[in-house]
Structures are given as structure tokens and as C-alpha cells.
Amino acid sequence: MAECGGIYSEWYVGISENARSRLFQDHSVDEKNDNWIFSRAMSSETARRIEQHFLSLGTKGGPGGGDNNADFVYAYKINSHTIE
């Protein structure tokens, strides 16, 4: 996030079992032109802790998403065409 600019409130953070689908289909992130990232956590519990950390810093999103298989943490910089 620091490398791409903006403040935390301009970013959305979530967890998912399939981060690519969440980013590019559900949230309408432009894969080539938008700022985004995802990474696999060691477990769903770890992914939830990471998500909570960024939410406490002011990112958009909400706890409780995904299921017990949601071990990817993803983030994208919010744009007018993205869907939160």
C-alpha cells in the first residue's frame, strides 16, 4: 500500500479462498491498471488477523467474510469503477 500511494481509507482489504475471483470479478478491479495485491496466509485464522490489522488502520472492508478455507488476504486501491 505504501508503494502505491494513498492513505489506508483509500484501500479495501478482504479475505477469500479465491482472491483473483474476488478482486477481478466481484470487486471489478482492473488487473492491468489498478493497484492491487494478494497473498496466501498460513491459515484462515492468520488471514483474519491480518485483515483485522488493516481494518484497524482504517482500510475499508469488514470482518467476517469468507469461510474456513479463506486463506488469501487481498487489497486494492478503491477507484470509481471498483465495487466495495
Image (cartoon, rainbow, N blue to C red):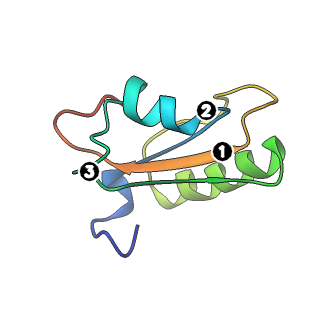
Q: Which quarter of the image is occupied by the C terminus?
A: top left
Say which residue label 1 marks. Answer: 72
Give the residue furthest to the bottom: 3
| Image quadrant where residue 15 sits | top right
- Expressed as whole percent of the image width and height from the top left, the position of residue 83 reads 31, 28
**Could you tell which of marks 2 and 3 lies nearer the N-terminus?**
2
Identify which amino acid the numbered label 3 is placed on.
Asp
Q: CA distance from mark 2 to mark 3?
A: 18 Å
31 sits left or right of 15 in the view: left
Mark 3, Cα crowd under 10 Å, few <14 / some 14-19 / many 20+, is some
Camera-nearest residue between 35 and 66: 35
Identify which amino acid the numbered label 2 is placed on.
Asn
Badges 1 and 2: C-beta atoms under 8 Å apart?
Answer: yes
**Could you tell which of marks 1 and 2 lies nearer the N-terminus?**
2
Identify which amino acid the numbered label 1 is placed on.
Phe
The secondary structure type at the circle numbered 1 is strand
Q: What residue appears at the point 79 percent right and 41 percent down from the top-left corner?
A: 44
51 sits left or right of 36 in the view: right
Say which residue label 2 marks. Answer: 18
Say which residue label 3 marks. Answer: 34
